[in-house]
Amino acid sequence: MSIFKRIILCLLILSIVGYLFLTLNGKNQESVTATEENDPKENFNDKIESEYDESSEPAKSKSTKRNAYDNDNSNIIEKESEDQMQVEKEDRITATFNTGEVNVNEYFTKIKITDEIYDRIYNKSYKKNCPLPLEDLRYLELLYYGFDGETHVGEMIVNKRIADDVISIFKELYEAEYPIERMELVDEYNADDNASMSANNSSAFNFRYIDGTTTYSNHGKGLAIDINPLYNPYVRMKNGVREVLPVSGEKYADRSIDNKYYIKKNDICYNIFTKYGFTWGGDWKNSKDYQHFEKSIK
């Protein structure tokens, strides 16, 4: 065979081999592609990844909305609960009981100043500039024997250092059926002493400075208590003129008149308060504060 024919034959064989190689490689590639397209695992993973990418933000948004809804719901429930507690508290404060209908041990209690109580007293009895820490005050819930001869629930805020003594005092007054007309926080009268006294409201803490000084009073420290102030007014001389507070208590400034609501030396109210170390304003020399009991704390 000539050299020329051999060359032609080799080229022909190479062409056939090349053709076969390209054909087989193309089929294998198609097979791989078809396998990838139909592989359930690969498709599932791709779908998961795709759905995560596309819906992660909406999912987060839904979660946020749900959390917000839950929080709002929680706030609503909490608010409803607080409102209900407030209603129950108000009902209890103004409650009236007949003899034997109340468990005394449920009352005559003390607690720290809660947020709810703080909201009631802030910028009223507890002024914005009040230097006395809230921690030094205690809220008391007490029973008292009313002018109507029935049992009532009252409230009072005092210094924590006299809280136990005050509870004991009012428990003894209650057991003795000593009449007290009203016992509310002075804040119910916008912390106006004259308004509270005129209503014959027995109260304690109300921050204020002593007139003309930078020293705050014993009421401002929660160390003083006024009892039936309308019938036991504060009487003093001011610029040579007698002043009676509250003004409506003028007719009760005459202590020679017999009145069962007067506080007098050695009567039951006087004896119980002084038993626990309190002093009485009716014993003062330059003025007379017949409603007033206070205790000095060293």
Image (spheres, rainbow, N blue to C red):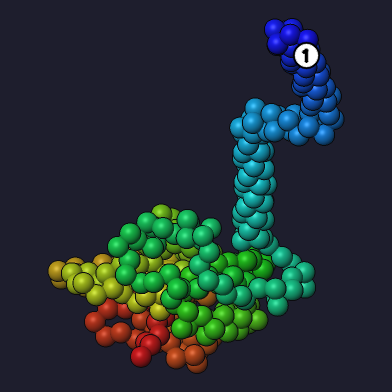
Horizontal arrangement in the rendering, residue 6 relative to residue 107 (left or right): right
Q: Residue at point 69% right, 29% down?
A: 50
Q: Is residue 9 above or below residue 82?
A: above
113 or 170: nearer the viewer? 113
Which image quadrant is residue 142 in?
bottom right
Q: Residue at point 49% right, 90% down?
A: 276
Kindly identify which residue carries mark 1: 13
Q: Amino acid at mark 1?
A: Ile
260 or 68: nearer the viewer? 68
Which class describes the residues within 10 Å of circle 1: few (<14), some (14-19), or many (20+)? few
Horizontal arrangement in the rendering, residue 25 relative to residue 199 (left or right): right
262 or 106: nearer the viewer? 106
Which image quadrant is residue 34 in?
top right
* Outermost front residue: 2
Q: Please state, as top left, top right, bottom left or bottom right, where the C terminus lies in the image.
A: bottom left
Q: Residue at point 43% right, 66% down?
A: 230
Secondary structure under badge 1? Answer: helix
Q: Is residue 59 above or below residue 251?
A: above
Total labels drawn:
1
